[in-house]
Amino acid sequence: MPPKRLIAMVTDFGLNDHFVAVMKAVMININPEAAILDITHNIARHDVFDAGLKLYQSFRHFPSKTIFLCVVDPQVGTSRRILTCSDGEYLYIAPDNGLLSFIYKDRPGIEVYNVTYTHYFLENPSCTFHGRDMFAPLAAHMSKGLYPAETGEIITDYKKIMIPDPSKDSNDILCGVILGFDIFGNAVTNIDNEAAGDDFGVKILEYIIQKPSSSYDEGSEKALNIIKGSSGFLELFVKNGNSRDDFGIKRGMKIFLKLR
């Protein structure tokens, strides 16, 4: 008997409608023993990049053979492809819209398949709810032992979104960018905690942060602070505040780090 596989979900469906519950019902109908866990359903509508970031921040903490079911799909009902993937440790299902770009970058040996074996889908799929009719059935069958290689043909031309890397100039200034935010308004950068070391200062817009904080509580109120975040990247934060709302920090903004 194949090992039981956990299904972990990332969507932009929210919880006000029936979408998530119906997807879970479809999976349980196919595999009554399916174990399903929510990563998040609160991705901003159609924000493929943030879905990829949230997946990247969480995936390595899951058990081996977890199936990551990711449905943020602005092109639902079009000819965009549905992908199943294996990196040797985890399995992934997502639309071919770049959502898995962080995973592609982190796992260069990943195998990606274009799903062409449609008999795994529900009959007469809707053109507006592929999450229920295509993605959920695939996840359920994979939780019973189906492998990506059994869903279609391997491809190499899958869509990627550019994930920026920090760069260093001749003055030892490391330039990074803001990748996204958590619910507290903390801004996640692309600068690795280890690359920053223990003694550094930061500049973003006109704001200068002289040194990192060791906890959120240690930071200053009504000021931007920097901390080594739990996902492995530096984060901007405001004690009892919100870096996005209070200081206008936005995704894609440059941040400069001076190594000491």
Image: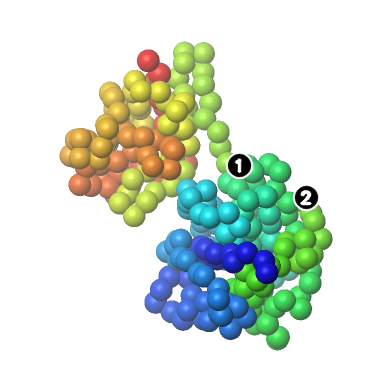
Q: Nearer the viewer, residue 17 or 222?
A: 17
Q: Please identify the quarter of the rendering in which residue 95 is found.
A: bottom right
Q: Residue 113's x, y, as percent?
A: 75, 59
Mark 1 falls on what kind of element? Answer: helix
- Mark 2 to mark 1 CA distance (whole Å): 16 Å
Residue shown at 39%/49% (left/top)? 181
Q: Nearer the viewer, residue 116 or 225?
A: 116
Q: Nearer the viewer, residue 153 or 203?
A: 153
Q: Residue 212's x, y, as percent?
A: 30, 28
**Mark 1 is on which residue type?**
Asp
Q: Nearer the viewer, residue 50 or 103?
A: 103
**Mark 2 is on which residue type?**
Thr
User: Do we see residue 102 in this rendering?
Assistant: yes
Q: Residue 62's x, y, as percent?
A: 51, 54
Q: Which residue position holds label 1?
A: 106
- Which residue appears farthest toward the right when viewing the image? 153
Mark nearer the viewer, 2 or 1: 1
Residue shown at 34%/38% (left/top)? 236
User: Do we see residue 223 in this rendering?
Assistant: no
- Mark number displayed over residue 156: 2
N-term mark: 2 or 1:
1
Residue shown at 45%/20% (left/top)? 173
Please say which color scheme the image uses: rainbow
